[in-house]
Amino acid sequence: MNKPNPNPLSSMDQWEEDLLKRYPDPEMTKEKKDFRNYKDSDREDTVREFYKLNHQYQTYDFVTSKEKEFLVFNKREMSIWEALDYLNTLVDDSDPDIELDQLQHLLQTSESIRKDGHPDWFVLTGLLHDLGKVLCLFGEPQWAVVGDTFPVGCGFSEKIVYPQFFNSNPDFSDDRYSSKLGVYTQNCGLENVKMSWGHDEYLYQILKDYLPKPALYMIRYHSFYAQHREGAYDHLMSEEDHEYFNWVKLFNPYDLYSKAPVPPDVEALKPYYQDLITKYLPEKLSF
């Protein structure tokens, strides 16, 4: 029997393309036909296959095992700039709009935030928010790195993308995890909830002692579309969660809609961002 492909996406940007289809920018001035105009008719099937794997294998026990494996932070020690350079080995060759490496995409996000006059820690968050994707370079399959995130340990919401694929998840029929609250209590707060494993949670755990709380919410929950776009998990959210999700919602358009064909001048911008990194973070971090 053939094993399933652990990396069904030809590039991780296919997930972002799917997000743009589901959550288009209402103020987008570019013609839809000109934006991410892929000619490959199989791309939608590829995204479906990605979520089929994601929803089948993201269980409470799986997340627990990944926390034990990765949250000891013994893979590599790097400065932020070294980590950004390392992430650039994930250059996406399939994006038809622009030919940008990962660092350039992150700089476009952070520069858009900076242009709008937000605090410097918000600008830094734009630069860092996808850095957890280095998990792919540590051998993690794509379905355990990117994709919409969601709580595990409780019932899966119908508002999560492709909810039908949860039928194959062992937790779906496990009495401990299948009820609306599962192992949690009403409005227990997301700090007490395990999220599906991926780059959001991983980077949050690396940076949680260094950045302001709004920045940490942006990093930890920017892929939690079932909540910040659909409001599917209000029953787990605390009042504090609702307050800080206003920051997540503010950040999201910069993440999704900041791509542009003109690449940022990395060398010109680097001194500013090096100073910003030094202000908030230690010289080296453990990944």
Image: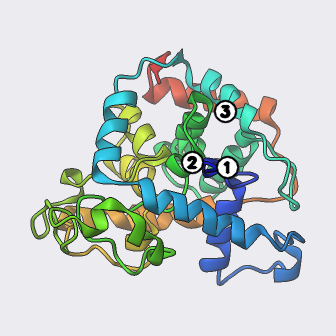
Name the residue at the left extreme: 185
Q: How crowded is mark 2: few (under 14 residues within 10 Å), some or many (20 or more)?
A: many
Q: Where is residue 121 in the image (x, y as percent from the top left)?
A: 47, 43
Residue pictured at 86% horizontal, 72% vertical: 37
Q: Residues within 10 Å of mark 1 (few under 14, many from 20)?
A: many
Residue pictured at 86% horizontal, 55% vertical: 98
Name the residue at the front extreme: 1
In front: mark 1 or mark 2? Answer: 2
Q: Nearer the viewer, residue 161 or 96?
A: 161
Q: Where is residue 127 in the image (x, y as percent from the top left)?
A: 60, 42
- In the rendered structure, which disc, 2 or 3, sits on the residue that comes first in sequence? 3
Distance between the alpha carbons at the discs numbered 1 and 3: 19 Å
Distance between the alpha carbons at the discs numbered 2 and 3: 15 Å
- In the rendered structure, which disc, 1 or 3, sits on the residue that comes first in sequence? 3
Cβ–Cβ under 8 Å for marks 1 and 2? yes
What number is the disc on residue 126?
2
What number is the disc on residue 87?
3
Image position of 129 (left or right of 91): left
Q: Name the residue under label 1.
A: 111
Cβ–Cβ under 8 Å for marks 1 and 3? no
Q: In which quarter of the image is residue 261?
A: bottom right
- In the rendered structure, which disc, 1 or 2, sits on the residue that comes first in sequence? 1
Image position of 104 (left or right of 7): right
Q: In this view, does 246 lie above or below 267?
A: below
Q: Where is residue 119 in the image (x, y as percent from the top left)?
A: 48, 49
